[in-house]
Image: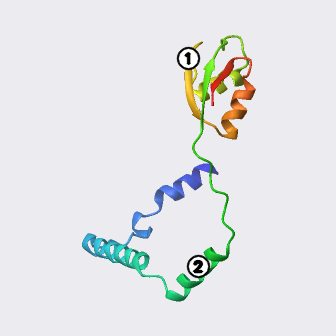
Amino acid sequence: MTEKKSDEKAQAPKAARPKKAAKDVDALVAEVAEVAVAAVAAKTMPAKPAKAAKAAEAKATEPKAMEPKAATTIRIRQVGSGICTPVDHKQTLKALGLRRIRQEVVRPDTPATRGMVRKVRHLVTVVGE
């Protein structure tokens, strides 16, 4: 029974298959160029004045967000070896940029950095803030 199905497929004429419509390359290039020009024109259109005025009012009425603090940094020194420590401690030392004992790095004083220092507090010290 399987032989008959394979024979039927083999005997199907290739002319019966639908052919892909061949388009002229120049016509396709022209069509793509028109679409690109339309997209650029849509992006460069000036915003309507009413929408701009509403946006300005909304910004004026919103409470001001907390301004970020001045860029403070902390200096971290590695004082213990990462050998025989859990993998996540080794990864934390690498994320802090520490590779060897007595190496110091300067990092921004952010909660993320403080959390990393806290995690490996037995391997590092904060030299300066």
The quadrant the C terminus occupies is top right
Q: Residue at x 72, y 15 (%)?
A: 85
Q: Secondary structure at mark 2?
A: helix
Q: Secondary structure at mark 1?
A: loop
What amino acid is at disc 2?
Answer: Ala
Q: Which residue is mark 1?
A: 103
Is residue 73 depicted above or below 53 in this figure? Answer: above
Measured Cα–Cα span from mark 2 to mark 1: 50 Å
Q: Position of residue 67 (x, y in %)?
A: 63, 56
Determine the image quadrant of residue 29: bottom left
Counting residues from the start of the chain, the first of labels 2 and 1 encountered is 2
Q: Position of residue 105 (x, y in %)?
A: 55, 25
Is residue 10 depicted above or below 87 in this figure? Answer: below
Towards the viewer: 6 or 110: 110
Q: Which residue is mark 2?
A: 55
Tag 2 and tag 1, C-beta contact below 8 Å: no
